[in-house]
Amino acid sequence: MAFNPAEEPQYVTKFKQNIMIIRKIVQALTVCALFAAMSSCIKDEPLNSECDILEVTVPGDVLNREPVISNNKVTLVVKNGVDVRSLAPEFKLSEGATIDPPGGTVRNFTNPQSYTTTSQDGEWHKTYIIEVQHNNSAISLEYDFENVRHIKALGGMCTYDEFYELGVTGQDALVWASANSAFALTLQGSTPNTFPTYQGDDGVEGGKCVVLVTRSTGSFGQRVKKPLAAGNLFFGTFDGTNALTNPLGATHFGIPFGQVPVQFNGYYKYKSGDTYGEANSDGVLVPVEGKRDMFNLYAVLYETSAGHEWLDGSNVLSQDNPMIICTAEIPDRQECSQWRPFSVPFKYRAGKSIDPVKLHEGKYNIAIVMSSSQDGDYFCGAIGSTLQVDELSITCEE
């Protein structure tokens, strides 16, 4: 006889209902467990440890050019006539980072002001000095390389030198840039004198000097097809985010300049490394028979415009670069074991001159660039090539 569901015993029906309730409870507990697991994962995700200033803006039409942001300094160039006693810069920071005093705080920038950033995880802090200059502010014209600060990299695993110059007020007037921060990634440097750019002891007057050495980048460099790193130092900033993908574009040459340069002066010593090499497709430095390494040391004055506020390794000396006004290059560079003086004039490119109105408006930049291997930006040169430089100066029109 066929079973009629309508005649199902009551206890069976109740049993089925209980089974359905249990299933729903199990499903609910499973969902709760998943949410708990997801919540746990979110809580366990490490907070950001970076605390960099990425961008700076100032309300109103007061800036003459884009802010210059280096490792621990920001330079704001404002238009002539702007009252620097009441500026309120705003900041874009690393994810989750904070800044004290906060962005939008009105401060008197007659003197440089200090800001402290704190990482999202609260473990890291950085102090930035923000300096405001007018278009026609004069910069230091003499550079003796007596002042360095030690920058720790890779969580304190290594330390390198950062050069700076003092102004008449005793504050930092200029911070030199180098690619030392990129070299740290190779794990080939530990103390300052094992990096490509560091402070030496035997200066012209018995004081300090800058030493630039072409170094091997080891197995890391070979893997990324960049087997050497030339020591370099320059006016401007180094963009470490481009160091591997676009090394020529990583060097941003130039700082604002409001005078008419006439002469570039200084002293150097140079010793080429034993074997000049060029990187092959496997990142190996292949010797080039009969070729000797040579250094670079020059100055360039150029005109800026919106979106074109610096030169880089691809165009800093290009003959067809319309931005360049004049250059000062040493014509007879040579190896020498004793300090060799030089004094070279700024030579103007054909049809170029300095416009007094643009000069007053702060439309010109100047760059001083030096390297232990002139082809180092193409990862060619001789390991061990060493350039020492001291007592640089720029002579300007009265």
Image (cartoon, helix red, strand yellow):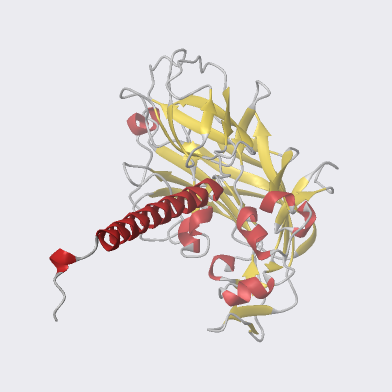
Residue situated in front as seen by the camera: 61 or 300: 61
Using the rendered image of the protein, determine whether residue 135 is visible from the camera's viewpoint. Answer: no
Q: Is residue 49 above or below residue 193?
A: above
Residue situated in front as seen by the camera: 341 or 161: 161
Q: Is residue 29 above or below residue 136?
A: below
Quadrant assignment, res 284 = bottom right
Image side of residue 262 versus residue 342, left or right: left
x 63%, y 35%: residue: 125
The percent position of residue 83, horizontal first and vertical second, equals 41, 14
x 38%, y 26%: residue: 58
The percent position of residue 141, horizontal first and vertical second, equals 61, 34
Residue situated in front as seen by the camera: 217 or 312: 217
x 48%, y 25%: residue: 133
Q: Is residue 189 above or below residue 168?
A: below
Using the rendered image of the protein, determine whether residue 249 is visible from the camera's viewpoint. Answer: yes
The percent position of residue 220, horizontal first and vertical second, equals 64, 71
x 38%, y 27%: residue: 360
Quadrant assignment, res 88 = top left
Image side of residue 216 versus residue 320, left or right: right
Image side of residue 351 versus residue 232, left or right: left
Image side of residue 69 versus residue 392, left or right: left
Q: Quadrant of the N terminus?
A: bottom left
The percent position of residue 65, horizontal first and vertical second, equals 38, 35
Q: Is residue 157 above or below residue 150?
A: below
Looking at the image, how many numbered discs can be counted on the residues?
0
Residue at the front extreme, as displayed: 1
Residue situated in front as seen by the camera: 186 or 193: 186
